[in-house]
Structures are given as C-alpha cells and as structure tokens.
C-alpha cells in the first residue's frame, strides 16, 4: 500500500523506544502484519533497508509475522477465514464478505544489543 | 520512495509555507511550519563506547560478543497518524463539523464537483482543504466559488496525513455546524491507509475510467461509505457498464452506497445533496444536538 511511509513510522517507533529504554543498536525487528493489510512484504523489506540505513537499526534483520485474515459473511451470518482480499466465503462461495480482521500492522518486538 | 506510486520524502507546504521536518536530540521527528527558509545542520555525534560497571557477570572482554535482549513494543505502525486523526475528529465533533475525505484517481472531477456543490448549498457554511503534490490551482478554484479553502502541497508525498490536516485547521478555521470537504491527492492507493479524522470517505469514480476500478483498488472502495459515479452524461458515448461497476463496488464493500451523478449536467446532484443532508442529521443526532439548517 504505502510501504515507504510505513517503514518511516517503524523507524520512528524504534527511535522512540531507544530513547525510552536506552538501547543503541537494533539487531532484529519483528513486525506483525495482517494478511489483508495490503502490505507487500518484499516492498516492506526494500523500504525498511533504505530507511534504516545510517540509523541505529542499520543492517537489522526484518522478520514479518503474518496474522490471519478474517471476514463477516452476510449470507452465512458468520465469521469466516479469508485468505485473499477479494476472496469468496469458504462456506457459501459468495462474495458478500466484509473484512473484519487481519488488516493490522504492528511493531511487535525488537532484539537489541545489551549495553 | 513509495514502491506503489513512486512518491517519497516529505516536502509539505500549507498555502505555500514550507513544513520543516527534523529529528531532535531525543530521536523524535519534529514537523512544523517555517515562514522563511533557514539553514542549520542536524549532525550530532554518537558515542558508541559503552560504560563498564563491572556488574554484568556474563560480559566477556575476550571476543566482541555483545549480549542481546528482546524489547516488547506492541505498537501500531499507524499509531502516530491515528493519534493526530483522533485530535482532528475531536476538533470536528466539538464544532459539529461534518468532514468528508474525497478520494479518487486524478481527473475524476472532484474539484468541479465541489465547485458545483458549494453553489448548490447556497450559502450553507462549507470549507475545503485541497491536497495536491504541487500548485494551488484547486484552492483558487474553490475560493472563486465563494468558500474558504486552504491548499496543502504534499511535495513528493502521495497522500494527505492527519498531521497535515491538523496543521491546516487553525488557518482555515471552519465554522461551527459546517461541512468540510477534504480533497485528497488524486490517488486510489495510499490515501486509504491514512485516517484524517473524517466522518466518511467518498470515492469518486468517473465513467471514463474502468468498471473494474473497485477491484483494482479495493482498499479505497472498502474504506468509502459512498461511491459517486461521475460524468454520467457521457454514458451514451461510452461502452461503460454501470451495473457491473456497482456490482464490483459491492463485492469489495457490500455496504457502500452509490449515487450516479453528472457534475456537468447537474443530474443526480439532488441525491448527493440529500445524502450530505442525511449525514449531517445523522451526525447531529449521534451527538445529541439539533441540526442547523
């Protein structure tokens, strides 16, 4: 969707955490990205590497954990699993499914160097 | 650079005044407006020597082995934007302002729609925030129609964010119980992700575009409460399947409302004005106050 802006926000969150918690070097960044968040992991990696260059997270590994997609099927009146953005309901095959979960994007955890 | 649309960096201008962004000593990003250019550098030295207290039992000086630890963050990537959007939403609520975020691809007729809408509202208070990468042409067109407008130039940026809107609001000073149209940068991709504090997104699709636009840009049509199908006066000259387009929009967003409109001929304008009226009434009712005519 807009991986460059998102990568910049990730760096800002890391820098805020660094000043709060007093670390100076980040080895690994673990993101949690919903399957339906419209974020391309490869684009995210590319942008992340570009954005963190020259910062405390330069060279850090980026791990992306995917969370499952979920939708509400108006026909089945039930919450169903969704594997693609415009996917059909796995129960009835209909398309009246409203996405309800799996669109979040979070910085979950950092591995930082111990001072 | 945005890999989707090619934008990047922040060179935002509000009514021609530059917004300046820098990273402070505390590591935070500061963004503010400067009336005049200035020069200063932000270099500061980092000291990477680490103190040794002698307490850490595992610390070895033989190799260059550095221990690591995990730090829980659990923070939404869009948290900062969402916080600013929350402030905007509060601003609108306190003043009974109905704020609508207008999104579309370039050339769908957003500005023309606004000019005609302002005329049709016949003196009802309305203000406009215009977002474009460059030029203040759109804000000037709006001002010529009699409504206050402020232009945000996003520079290389491909969408408005909540902080830009927050910084534009004091200058625009929209009045109580008014309508505020935020015309986003013509782009069906990035603006979907950035909440501005609006009550609803309105997506505008021109019949000179493709029927599959909702399927190609699902995030935008999923975020929208209303789709305006514009330039319907051209339908006799085009091979455009209206039913198919509406079906595609409903496939992406079963709840989306659709109004067929022609800004040029005025067809459908009454439906659009009635929709605006309903939204204002619904908002007033939800806030427990009477709507002002």
Image: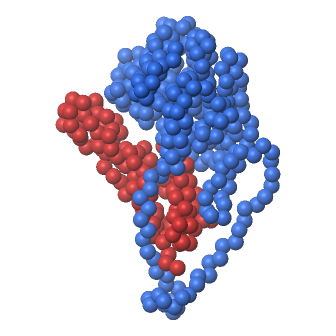
Chain colours: A red, B blue
A96 lies above or below A47: above
B17 lies above or below A35: above
B229 lies above or below B180: above
Q: Is residue B133 visible?
A: no
Q: Is residue B69 visible?
A: yes
Q: Is residue B34 left or right of residue B152?
A: right
Q: Nearer the viewer, residue A65 or B23?
A: B23
Which percent across, then down, holds residue B251? 34, 28
Q: What residue is shown at x 46% (from left), y 20% (from top)?
A: B290
Q: What residue is shown at x 62% (from left), y 64% (from top)?
A: B26
Q: What residue is shown at x 44% (from left), y 48% (from top)?
A: A40
Q: Is residue A109 left or right of residue B49?
A: left
Which percent across, then down, holds residue A79? 23, 40
Q: How many marks?
A: 0
Q: Is residue B139 left or right of residue A46?
A: right
Q: What residue is shown at x 74% (from left), y 40% (from top)?
A: B17
Which residue is the extreme one toward the front? Answer: B289
Which percent across, then down, holds residue A32? 39, 55
A51 lies above or below B289: below
Which percent across, then down, holds residue A67? 33, 52
């Amino acid at each position: 969707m807009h991986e460059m802006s998102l990568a910049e926000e990730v760096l800002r969150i890391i820098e805020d955490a660094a000043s709060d918690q007093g670390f100076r070097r980040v080895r690994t960044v673990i993101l949690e990205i919903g399957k339906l968040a419209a974020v391309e992991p490869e684009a995210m990696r590319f942008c992340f590497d570009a954005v963190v260059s020259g910062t405390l997270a330069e060279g850090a590994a980026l791990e992306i954990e995917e969370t499952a997609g979920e939708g509400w099927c108006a026909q089945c009146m039930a919450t169903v699993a969704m594997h693609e953005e415009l996917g059909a309901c796995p129960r009835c095959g209909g398309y009246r499914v409203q996405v309800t979960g799996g669109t979040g994007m979070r910085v979950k955890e950092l591995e930082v160097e111990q001072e | 650079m945005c890999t989707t649309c090619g934008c990047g960096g922040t060179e935002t201008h509000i009514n021609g005044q530059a917004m300046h962004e820098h990273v402070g000593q505390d590591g935070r990003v500061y963004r503010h407006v400067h009336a005049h250019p200035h020069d200063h550098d932000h270099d500061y030295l980092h000291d990477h020597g680490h103190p040794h207290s002698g307490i850490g039992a595992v610390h070895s000086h033989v190799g260059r082995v550095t221990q690591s630890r995990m730090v829980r963050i659990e923070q939404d990537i869009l948290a900062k934007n969402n916080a600013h959007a929350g402030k905007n939403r509060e601003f609108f609520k306190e003043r009974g302002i109905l704020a609508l975020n207008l999104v579309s691809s370039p050339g769908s007729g957003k500005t023309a729609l606004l000019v005609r809408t302002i005329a049709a509202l016949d003196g009802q208070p309305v203000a406009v925030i215009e977002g474009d990468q460059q030029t203040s042409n759109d804000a000037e067109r709006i001002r010529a129609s009699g409504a206050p407008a402020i232009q945000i130039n996003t520079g290389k940026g491909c969408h408005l964010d909540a902080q830009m809107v927050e910084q534009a609001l004091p200058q625009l000073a929209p009045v109580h119980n008014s309508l505020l149209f935020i015309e986003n940068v013509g782009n069906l991709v990035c603006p979907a992700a950035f909440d501005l504090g609006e009550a609803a997104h309105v997506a505008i699709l021109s019949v000179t575009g493709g029927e599959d636009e909702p399927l190609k840009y699902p995030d935008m049509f999923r975020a929208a409460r209303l789709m305006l199908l514009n330039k319907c006066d051209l339908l006799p000259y085009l091979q455009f399947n209206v039913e198919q387009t509406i079906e595609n929009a409903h496939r992406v967003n079963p709840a989306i409302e659709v109004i067929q409109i022609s800004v040029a001929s005025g067809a459908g304008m009454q439906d659009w004005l009635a929709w605006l009226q309903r939204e204002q009434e619904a908002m007033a009712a939800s806030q427990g106050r009477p709507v002002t005519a």
